[in-house]
Image (cartoon, grey):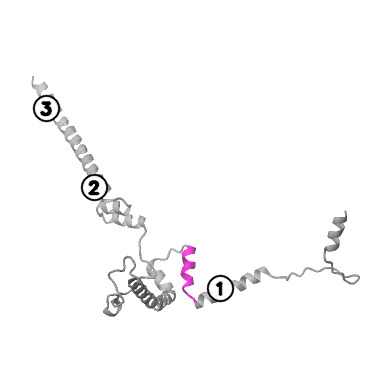
Amino acid sequence: EAEDEALRNSVPVILGPQGSQAQMLVADINIADSLKAIERLLDEIEDENPQLSLNRMRRAGSDLSYPGVVTAYDDAVNRIQEFRCNVDGGLLRALQMGISIGAFHRCDGFQPFSLDSYRQGALDFQIAERPVIRDTLSKRDAIELHNQSQAPKEWTWALLGHTDAEIAQAKTEEASVTRQVAAQLIGVMAGGERRPREEDDDAHT
């Protein structure tokens, strides 16, 4: 009991005048209005940074075609291309510098280069342009397009990820099955031709 009394006495207490009462120091926030304000802020940020709209489009699962996306989001595409122009030059120089440092310290794989390689133009290269919006077909669309255009089956097998050895084996098995079916048809046709002749022979005898 002495310990409990000591613990109670150690708790800080603020005493107020008679008739006073405690009040919760929590602001009365209108959540609905706050969310609308946040949405307006996000829209303003997206207007200033249109490239953010591409990420929202991807998450929303839009079914826009490639020309439709390029037309609807041309401001975002232009902004990304502008950003790439500013970054690619610095990245190119950083890579050239890294090769020169590796050549100076004679690191593995850098033996063909030296500190003179940059001056001699041996480190000259370019970062190729690449599309912001990839104009590609899904695997299913590509297979359907091959089937509609009556493309060779090998192309479809390659799209499905089969190796050259697996494709060759599949072609061999397919040819073997085709020969077996042809042989069976020839046998059936030959048997059908013999029966009328045998019946004619029986009729003459």
Front residue (pair 80, 38): 80
Q: Which residue is more in the foreground, 35 or 127? A: 127
Q: Earlier in the sequence, mark 2 or mark 1?
A: 1
**Where does residue 180 sit, x and y in percent of width and height?**
21, 37
Would residue 15 be found to the left or right of residue 57 on screen?
right
Which residue was labeled with disc 2?
168
Q: Which residue is mark 1?
A: 42
Circle 3 sits on which residue? 197
**SS under mark 1:** helix
User: Residue 116 lies in what quarter of the image?
Assistant: bottom left
Residue placed at 49% from the left, 71% from the top?
52
Please tell me whether mark 3 sits on a helix, a strand or a loop: helix
Task: Tell me if residue 194 is in the magenta stretch.
Answer: no
Q: CA distance from mark 2 to mark 1?
A: 56 Å
Provide the residue span drawn in magenta.
49-60
Q: Is residue 10 left or right of residue 102?
A: right
- Give the left or right position of residue 68, taking residue 36 as reference: left
The nearer-to-camera label among 2 and 1 is: 2
Q: Tag 2's secondary structure?
A: helix
Q: Residues within 10 Å of mark 3 (few under 14, many from 20)?
A: few
Q: Earlier in the sequence, mark 3 or mark 2?
A: 2
- Do the numbered discs 2 and 1 sit on residues whose CB atoms are within 8 Å? no
Identity of the residue drawn at 27% across and 56% down: 149
Residue type, label 2: Ala
Mark 3 residue type? Arg
Front position in the image: 144 or 22: 22
Residue 118 location (% of width, % of height): 30, 78
Q: Badge 1: few (under 14), some or many (20 or more) residues near its Cα, within 10 Å?
A: few
Instruction: State yes or no: discs 3 and 2 in contact (Cβ < 8 Å).
Output: no
Question: Which residue sits at x=26%, y=45%?
Answer: 170
By secondary structure, the bulk of the magenta-drawn segment is best described as helix
